[in-house]
Amino acid sequence: MVSYFYQKRFEDWTTNLAWDWCISRQRFYGVPIPVWYCKKCGEILLPDKKDLPVDPTESKPKKKCRCGSSELEPEMDVFDTWMTSSMSPQVAGRWLEHPEIYKKVYPMSLRPQSHDIIRTWAFYTILKSYLHFNSIPWHNVAIGTFVLDEHGKGMHKSKGNAVWADDLLKKYNVDVFRYWVGTARWGEDLPFKEKDFVAGQRFITKLWNASKFVLMHLEDYDGKKPKQLEPIDEWIFSKLQKVIKKATESFDVYESGDAKREVEHFFWQVFCDNYVEIVKPRLYSKEESDKEKRKSAQYTLYTVLLDLLKMFAPIMPHITEEIYALYFSKKEKVKSIHISEWPKYDKSLLDEKAENAGDLAVEIVGAVRRHKSSKNLSLKTPVKELTIEYKEQKMIESVLKDIELACGAEKILFGKGDLELAEGLKVRIVL
């Protein structure tokens, strides 16, 4: 299958072929064409199959021409690059050296390539596979992108608008580079913007810092699941399942950019900005009565962070491996994140009630934090009184303790609010 973005282009090229294509080139580099010509009679001489490969400019045939002449002229042309690169699936599968391996890997799963060589590399590879082996070479073709300059124009050395990867790698690490490439979508060109590299560096720093914070609070974690998860923990687990499902489905159809966006949004908005901030008081609590609640937070942090690292690993392999090696490799008893199991979507963890309650808690905690910031107060400033107005009071009550701790609320009441946050939800904040 050719990617749906460019399947029509492939079909049009194939349908409208009107002449033979030259397979030779007059170039210095290339695969030699193993042919000699008799100077006397013009006969074409070919080497025996067992003698291949042969460069006719350096070797002579082992037999004379049928006319008896040994005066032979070598073919000076080389094969057109597409005539040889179109055998890349066979070469990669070790067709001649290891036929038993070749049978297992051919046809291959995927050919990733750019859209400008659909009519050359894709077409010739498919054509030669049918002619030689009566088979498709791979099951899917993923049509990649061109990198354009900041103005959406093609990069050319002659125009002076080219950006070189070597120069970027002197300034940014390879995971930042991969983060930027990971934003691309198949079939769409990718404009180069250095601010995307800055964003990538910022993201990796955040991933490192957030992970270090989590791991700091897992030093005494025994690895066991708590008897009961707290509602806000059930909230993030439910949301995580949806992310795992979407990311897995995107990776399965090679849409790595969509997967990255889904996981990154969850990491920033749900995990770091909300969940970690809400459970911090539980993590710092040393009260015996909070022991199980703290364990619930530890179990959740362990599981969610590990799943996030696994989903980021195909895009940013180095930073995820580093974090994994710091803590998880010994716990999981798998030496590398890149050979660990992919996160499993667990439908039983979906809980709309927990999600609704958690979303309300996030709205309330966010409102309190914004209110404090607007008055240039520390987020640790206590709230003397927090009044919540909501029609389904029991839903709020399930996450009330986390709201109280995250807001630093000395008193929480149910009554009339004066600040509208969401449909049917209002609060009144007294500092």
Image (cartoon, helix red, strand yellow):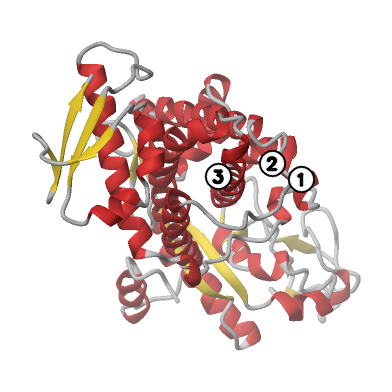
Which residue in the protein does label 2 denote? 324
User: Residue at (81%, 64%) from the top-left corner?
Assistant: 53
Residue 24 image offset from top left, x and y in percent: 57, 62
Q: Residues within 10 Å of mark 2 (few under 14, many from 20)?
A: many
Look at the image and tell me in which quarter the C terminus lies: top left
Which residue in the protein does label 3 denote? 293
Q: Amino acid at mark 3?
A: Lys
Which residue in the protein does label 1 denote? 329
Question: For this view, does 184 lie left or right of residue 72?
Answer: left
Look at the image and tell me in which quarter the N terminus lies: bottom left
Would residue 332 be visible to someone looking at this image? yes
* Circle 3 SS class: helix
Question: For this view, does 29 lie left or right of residue 391?
Answer: right
Label 1 close to label 2 by CB (< 8 Å): yes
Residue 270 image offset from top left, x and y in percent: 39, 43
The image shows residue 106, relative to residue 386, as above or below, that is: below
The image shows residue 24, relative to residue 224, as above or below, that is: below
